[in-house]
């Protein structure tokens, strides 16, 4: 049995949810409410000393780190693969995924924002700076390499797309302009046409609060944008 410790808005958990749905893997969601501090309880820290989501529990085998989890499920459930290609293509996909998951995302994480300032405006300015810096770099990498098709690597969904989509969701949520990332937006649009991405969306999770202001709105609205 697979349990995913998740939070509807967590972009790292969103990555893993997409991977699980792409592979049609059945899993149970266990919600950890980050705003209520449930990641920091003794009980959760005993399970996960990194006190963050996502955490995967596969028949008692517990694993943290979204990219490690995706790599694990890709090995255990190989179809469809989350990355294909020659060594250069595989490394490129990983480069894009890590630019977001290892460089950009940690700077905008809740625990970091809380240390930056108690002031919401200052926190948002910090987040906007690092998100813009990071995604400008990703967009440039995509443009210069020019291997993108419908997705980051041609027309094959890869782990890079699983990082781009949640990152853009987060930027949409904070109403950051996305005009400078046309390739990322094209990838997002093509991804969001797929059922796995829709099922993984923060707006359709068991712990999504009633009445949450939608970021995507109806999928059609996003697709038309
Ligand atoms: N590098 C980790 C990041 C995990 C992470 O930081 N998750 C965030 C949610 S996106 C979290 O749980 N934050 C809780 C906090 O900052 O207190 C991964 O990719 O899984």
Image (cartoon, rainbow, N blue to C red):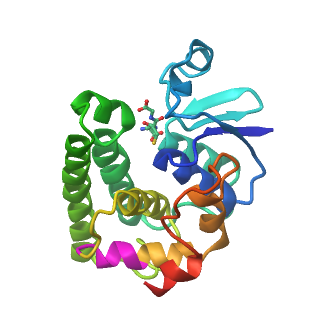
Vertically, is 66 above or below 132? above
Q: Would you say residue 183 sits in the magenta stretch? A: yes
Q: Position of residue 20 (x, y in %)?
A: 66, 54
Q: Position of residue 171 (x, y in %)?
A: 35, 59
Q: Would you say residue 90 sits in the magenta stretch? A: no
Q: Depth check: 79 or 172 in front?
A: 172
Q: Residue at x 48, y 65 (%)?
A: 215
Q: Residue at x 49, y 37 (%)?
A: 65
200 left or right of 141? right
- In the image, the segment drawn in magenta is 180-186
Vertically, is 125 above or below 145? above
Q: Main secondary structure of the magenta part?
A: helix
For the question of whether residue 156 can be seen, the reply is no
Q: Quadrant of the C terminus?
A: bottom left
Q: Residue at x 35, y 57 (%)?
A: 174
Q: Depth check: 146 or 223 in front?
A: 223
Q: Quadrant of residue 131?
A: bottom left
149 left or right of 217? left
Q: Position of residue 41 (x, y in %)?
A: 56, 17
Vertically, is 206 above or below 5? below
Q: Residue at x 75, y 53 (%)?
A: 25
Q: Position of residue 115 (x, y in %)?
A: 26, 27
Q: Quadrant of the N terminus?
A: top right
Report ligand 1 position as a quadrant.
Answer: top left
**Residue found at the far bottom of this picture:** 224
Count of labels shown? Answer: 0
For the question of whether residue 61 can be seen, the reply is yes
86 left or right of 113? right
178 left or right of 169? left
């Amino acid at each position: 049995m697979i349990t995913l410790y998740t939070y509807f808005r967590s972009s790292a958990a969103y990555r893993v949810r997409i991977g699980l749905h792409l592979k049609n893997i059945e899993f149970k969601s266990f919600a950890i409410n980050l705003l209520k501090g449930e990641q920091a309880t003794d009980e959760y820290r005993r399970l996960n000393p990194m006190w963050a989501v996502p955490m995967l529990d596969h028949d008692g085998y517990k694993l943290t780190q979204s990219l490690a989890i995706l790599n694990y499920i890709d090995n255990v459930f190989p179809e469809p693969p989350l990355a294909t290609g020659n060594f250069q293509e595989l490394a490129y996909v990983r480069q894009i995924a890590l630019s977001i998951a290892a460089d950009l995302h940690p700077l905008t994480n809740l625990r970091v924002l809380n240390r930056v300032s108690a002031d919401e405006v200052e926190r948002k300015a910090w987040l906007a700076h690092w998100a813009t810096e990071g995604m400008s770099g990703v967009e440039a990498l995509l443009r210069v390499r020019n291997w993108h098709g419908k997705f980051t690597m041609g027309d094959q969904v890869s782990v890079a797309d699983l990082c781009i989509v949640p990152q853009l969701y987060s930027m949409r949520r904070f109403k950051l302009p996305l005009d400078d990332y046309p390739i990322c937006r094209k990838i997002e649009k093509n991804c969001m046409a797929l059922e796995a991405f829709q099922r993984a969306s923060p707006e359709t999770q068991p712990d999504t609060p009633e009445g949450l202001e939608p970021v995507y709105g109806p999928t059609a609205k996003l697709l038309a944008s």
